[in-house]
Structures are given as C-alpha cells and as structure tokens.
Image (cartoon, rainbow, N blue to C red):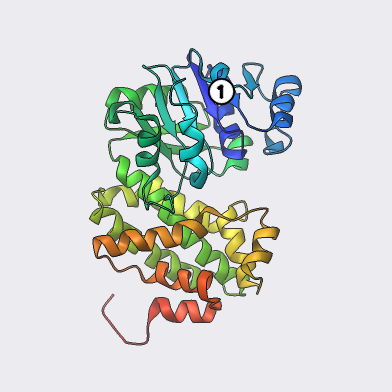
Amino acid sequence: MTNVTVLGAGAWGTGFGRVVADAGNDVMMWAIEPYIVKDIQEKHQNSYRLPAAGQLPETMKATGDRATAVKNAKIIVVAIAAQFARGALEQFKDLIPSDAIIVSLMKGVEKKTGKRMDQVVREALDLPADRFVAVSGPNLSKQVALRQPTATVVASTNHDAALAVAKACHTDYFKPYISDDVIGLEMAGSLKNVTALAVGMSHGAGYGENTAGVIMTLGLRELTRLGVAAGAKASTFQGLAGFGDLVATCSSPLSRNYTFGYNLGKGMSIEEATKASDGVAEGVATTSAVLQLAHQLNVKMPLAEAMNHVLSDGYSFSQMFAALTGTEITAE
C-alpha cells in the first residue's frame, strides 16, 4: 500500500485516483473547489466532474489544503489543466516531500513558452528527472470510471520510479506498460489533440470514415516527425501513447477535443463551441504552441497549420482539408 496524492479532481484526476485506490492504495484528492472536496469527503463521489464513477472507494479522501494534501505522499499525481499547471504547482514547491515521485497526467504544450508538461512540472517544482514520471494512453476518463479494460504507458528516465508508479495503478482492468521515452510520451499526448480537433470537425461537417482516416494518418505522420525531431523515439508514436491514444481521442464524443472540433464542423464559432463544450479544449491552445516548436525545429506541420487557420482565420472544414492535402500530386 502506498500513499498517493492527486492534485486536481477533474474527470481524469478522479478516474486515475479511483484506479490507484482499486489497486490497493490510500488516495488523497486535492481540489481547489470546496464543493468537490465536500462531495468526495462526505459522499464518496465526484458528481460534479465524474458522476460515471459512482461510489468511490473508502480509501479515497479529499482536502482543499495544500500542505495536508501532500504530507506523507510517496507518489503525487498532477492532473491540472495544462495552461494553469505552472502557477498551480509553484504553490506546492516547498510542501512536497523530498523523496516523492511526481507523476503527470497532463497532455498539452504550455502556450506562452512552447514547453512540454514534463519541462513545466520539473521547472515549477525544481524537480530532478529521476523523480518525474509521465502517464499517457487511450484512457478516456468516463470509460476508465466504468472500469472498462484499457492500458496505459508509464514513462520515466528512472526505471525504478516508472515501476513504482506502474505497480500503484495496476488493476485487473487497467494495465500499465513501462517506457523510458518521456519526450515521446509527452509529445504524442499533446499533438494528438490537434488531430482530434480536425477529425471531430470532419464528422461535424458531415463527412465519414474515409475523410477521418486521411486526417488521422497524416496527423500521426506529422506528430511522429515532430516528436523525433524533438528527441523522441519513433516507435513510441506507434504504440499505446501514440496510435492508441490517437484512435481513442479521435473516435469518441467523450473527448473534449473531438467534441470541440465537431461543433466547429457544424458551423459554430470558437465562442459557441467553447460554450457547448463547457470550456476550451486543450488542442486549441496546443495548436499554436505546436507550430511554434515546429518552426524552431524546422519541421513541416500541414495539419497543425491548417487547424491554426481554422482557429485564427475562421477556415471552414473544406478550406482546412484543402490546406492539409494541397493541390499537387506527390508521392505518399
């Protein structure tokens, strides 16, 4: 049994916390919202963010106090919205135990710096690489909450740290695999959101699986290209954290990125899609950050460029798809 703290009681933070509790660990959820803390602590549920989970295990508790949340924690899981992560984590910097492993569930690129979440977490907490772990895969929170079989990838430059986290989240329905490719995991989890926006947009515009298949294939190709240029392994993008996560995110209305794109495809404005999706999807902020990184690494990203035109210039789906595929006949 391990003391695990989850910072952020949104859908995925709560879902992963329940996985860890199911694996036999004590879990402390930290939330900034008092009503969520009360819901978890008194009723053992998170009806605001993950009602599908139903009754949460007795071993899951909650607090809004930062010091209480991380005290005695051996593993601290970060599940905060990517664009707010740095500021939120800086408030925990002097509270976290010196031997705690820090795990990121976040998928995104910090818009103002273009940095991956592993870089943001380590900078905010002044954390050495051997205490950082990233978790990513085809893990839609509602399906995890329903205990549907799935798998994930646990990556760290420190094998022992990755193994400790994998053991802490291994259940009969949630299978972790280990990797040392932190950069690949981070890049795959972030970049697939841009592709999910485009696939959702194609379906919203009324097109079928042929069109979606083109977008997913070209999207996987370019995110692999950018990942390798940033120092990742190409094989990571063919695995659970790459292709697996891409398929799940691009195929389900449970994905906020897919839903946001779907609403754009139907003709909604950014503002209307934001309201309908109950917030801005992570891929919206990630798109411009991805392009910034691509320019730095001199990598061509036609899908990200096309989606950026959608978000910045109001391109329709037809205009986006034309920008993606071009007009000339070329070799595949």
Relative to 92, is 157 on the left or the right?
left
Residue located farthest toward the bottom when viewing the structure as drawn: 328
Left or right of residue 47, residue 122 in this image: left
Return the residue found at the far right.
43
Q: Is residue 314 above or below residue 143?
A: below
Residue 19 in view, yes or no = no
Figure label count: 1
Q: Residue at x 52, y 43 (%)?
A: 84
Residue at x-position 42% and y-position 16%? 97
- The residue at 50%/68% (across/down) is 212
* Image x and y of residue 131, in percent: 33, 26
Image x and y of residue 288, in percent: 43, 62
Amino acid type indicated by mark 1: Arg
Q: Quadrant of residue 21?
A: top right
318 left or right, relative to 214? right
As helix, strand or loop, the secondary structure at mark 1 comes to: helix
Screen quadrant of the C terminus = bottom left
Where is mark 1, residue-wise?
66
- Is residue 88 visible from the viewing direction of this image? yes
In front of the other: 176 or 194 = 194
Tell me the crowding category of disc 1: few under 14, some 14 to 19, or many 20 or more residues within 10 angstroms, Cα based. some
Task: Measuring from the top left, give residue 271's x and y in whole percent.
Answer: 65, 65
| Quadrant assignment, res 65 | top right
Q: Is residue 147 above or below residue 318?
A: above
Q: Position of residue 74 (x, y in %)?
A: 44, 17
| Foreground residue among 325 and 177 | 325
